[in-house]
Image (cartoon, rainbow, N blue to C red):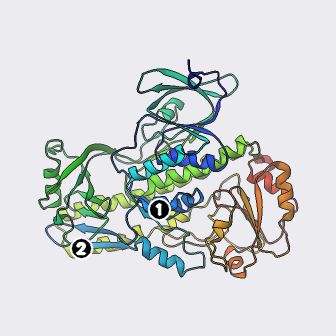
Amino acid sequence: MGKRHASAERPVPVLIVGAGPVGSTLALELAHHGVACLLVERHGAPSPHPKMDFVNGRSMELFRRLGVADEIRAGGVPARHSFNFQWFRSFAEPPVDEWTHPSVDEAFAHIARTNDGTAPLEPYQRLPGNVLEELLRRRAGEQPLVELRTGTAFRELTRQRDGTLAATLTDMATGEEYQVRAQYVVGCDGAGSAVRRGTGIAMPTVGPETDHCDVYFRSTDPRLRPYGRYFLGISAGGATLVSRDEKDTWTAFFPELDDTDFERDPIGVLSRRLGTDITVEEVLKVTRWRGRMRVAERYREGRVFLAGDAAHEFYPMGGHGANTGLADAVDLGWKLAGVLHGWGGPALLESYEAERRPVALFNREMCFNLLEVWQRFPQLAAAGAPPSHLAGYLAQERYQIENTGIHFGYRYSSSPLVLAEQTDTGEAPPTWRWTGITPSTWPGSRAPSVRLPDGTPLLDRLSRGFTLVDFSGKELGRDAATAADKRGIPLDVLAVDDPHARGVWERSLVLVRPDQHIAWRGETPPADWSEVLDQVSGNVTEGRRP
């Protein structure tokens, strides 16, 4: 028996099941913090189906930390193309409405002229999900701390006497089963997660389940763009067209009906749904899928964690599902690293569900909002609503793509790692906005992006561990570094002499976590840095919190 098949070998720190975008991002995050992992994937290559299309700006900020943002942009849709939705009664007539959103070029231009914290560090990026998956998997496999095994299926987990986990894996090429031991296991293996099923964690569906058909194809037919470019073209006949590359690659999806002759003639069915005949050079893939809204009741069972679609499943619209999963990976990754490096306490891993599950529940409801528009539009058209009424209905829903507040505004206010604001000024937490970013360093919030006088983004100056940003000019953060060093907590003090940045960041001392969220802030140092550091590192129990 080879070494890699020996169950008695030293356990790997983390076993990640599933090397899709979420699993590969988790592997990169762990390597970013110096932690080794085994990343297994049953498929030998990324899916040929593009799946997701939209990496939101917050995900791009997180990818920037990992050094992959530029490569993602290079593989995506060119930055000059705008982000438009066109709504048609039929492709044989002009759209009844168009929702427009700035292109990446336009978004970067806005960022360049905005320095008050209301703009992100990175805008969104469109690219096919299989391209992102291939890129992230390759980058993870290049990491010395990541062992990537494709063609490897996960079967089951058993708990060992020493507290570790034994995972039974199968080599898909030979059929051979073997075991590996791991200190922690993370299921990133999708909506049908075998890891989740093995834990017994329930994942109830909220709302109806609907069956859909997808056809992925290449076509240069100008009838697909009768009225200019768009990202999404939505027909009242029930079909949605997705431009994958702004060239000739498309996906169409639509609800499955009993009379749909989909397998025999998918393009004929699509043409009828669009209201115009189209010519297709090549059908790349035809699939069926079930749309549903689900969030797991728990994200953890002992040393087993869930992330991405294994923890939450949404309809593929609005960019909520994949981006929620990418943030899961970053949140869990730095916390696992803290525990494995010895400075993280029990509350560090407990905080993963406390922080990420509320975000998933919120995003599920936001996805319901957009799904309702998708469902009502064809119903209103079928009921005979005139184009002016359809346009009026869609106009009032246009705000749903102006949703940067959703992407950047989530705040970990109930986290056991965050020190609640204690003030006698009567100051209230900032009000969340759907559109735009509310810059704030209120504990739990994402740190605002602001450029320093030399043009460097302040977020780029943050360290891989904790960063205490000191605007005081008096070295008030010096004792924090000493206290952190005694506990083995990675903490750098960043002195910043910039009144403008100080105004945006609101306090003289701001402690930022590895994921760029605020852990604590104050005008003066706390009475005891030890209490603050114990809490933000998960070493304070409920009864001992300061």
Q: Residue at x 37, y 46 (%)?
A: 292
Q: Position of residue 322 (x, y in %)?
A: 45, 52
- State which quadrant residue 116 falls in: bottom right
Q: Is residue 64 left or right of residue 364?
A: right
Q: Quadrant of the N terminus?
A: top right
Q: Residue at x 14, y 57 (%)?
A: 279
- The disc label shown at residue 157, or none: none
Q: Is residue 475 left or right of residue 310?
A: right
Q: Is residue 108 visible?
A: yes
Q: Which residue is mark 2?
A: 389
Closer to the camera in the image, 306 or 247:
247
Q: Earlier in the sequence, mark 2 or mark 1?
A: 1
Q: Residues within 10 Å of mark 2 (few under 14, many from 20)?
A: some
**Residue 364 appears in the rendering:** no
* Position above or below: 397 against 208: below
Residue kind at label 1, given as amino acid type: Asn
> What amino acid type should be assigned to the residue bearing mark 2?
His
Q: Which mark is residue 56?
A: 1
As displayed, is residue 481 above or below residue 42? Answer: below
Of the residues tagged 2 and 1, which is closer to the observer? 1
Q: Position of residue 544 (x, y in %)?
A: 81, 49
Q: Residue at x 71, y 46 (%)?
A: 338
> Which of 57/201 is in front?
57
